[in-house]
């Protein structure tokens, strides 16, 4: 159970993107098939997932003493759900999820590239003094 929660914490942005995109696509498919009620339910579910994630992200930001755009995203999704614009709520949720997924991917790539750069950094340095190359620790 602990391993599953750790995996979910590391991949929450990708999971949210998959869930919200699936909800948006399912709602579109159901509306095209003539099942508007089911489509609305799928869009509402995607919107609720986005609102829950925005609320969680906003709480984390407040805990760190920062206010981010999560407040705006939460207001937009909750407002769209409140007035019955379920498609808009689902689209905003997908936009929020795709932004989070892109941010998580970029952070992972930056972390990996910095680690690689640090691994390639020289461990010793040499300085040319008095016609000799000497390690820096010898030159004072």
Image (cartoon, grey):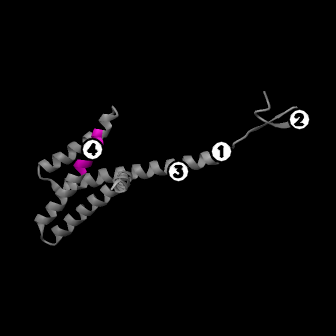
- Element at label 1: loop
Q: What residue did someone put label 3 on?
A: 112
Q: Residue 131 — which label?
A: 2
- Crowd class of label 2 (few under 14; some 14 to 19; many from 20; radius 10 Å): few
Residue at horizontal 74 percent and vertical 39 percent from the top: 125
The disc, 3 or 2, on the residue closer to the chain's N-terminal end is 3
Residue 121: quarter of image: top right
The disc, 2 or 4, on the residue closer to the chain's N-terminal end is 4
Chain part drawn in magenta:
50-59
CA separation, marks 3 and 4?
Answer: 27 Å
Residue at horizontal 45 percent and vertical 50 percent from the top: 106
Residue 18: quarter of image: bottom left
Q: What residue did someone put label 4 on?
A: 56
Q: Which is more foreground, mark 2 or mark 4?
A: 4
Q: What residue did someone put label 1 on?
A: 121
CA separation, marks 4 and 1?
Answer: 39 Å
């Amino acid at each position: 159970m602990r391993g599953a929660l750790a995996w979910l914490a590391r991949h929450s942005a990708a999971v949210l993107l998959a869930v919200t995109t699936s909800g948006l696509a399912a709602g579109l498919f159901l509306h095209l098939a003539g099942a508007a009620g089911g489509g609305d339910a799928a869009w509402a579910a995607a919107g609720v997932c986005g609102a829950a994630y925005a609320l969680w992200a906003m709480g984390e930001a407040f805990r760190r003493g920062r206010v981010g755009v999560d407040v705006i995203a939460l207001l937009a999704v909750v407002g769209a759900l409140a007035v019955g614009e379920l498609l808009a709520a689902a689209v905003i949720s997908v936009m929020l999820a795709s932004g989070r997924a892109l941010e998580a991917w970029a952070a992972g790539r930056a972390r990996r590239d910095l680690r690689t750069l640090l691994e390639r950094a020289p461990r010793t340095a040499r300085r040319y003094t008095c016609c000799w190359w000497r390690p820096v620790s010898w030159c004072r």
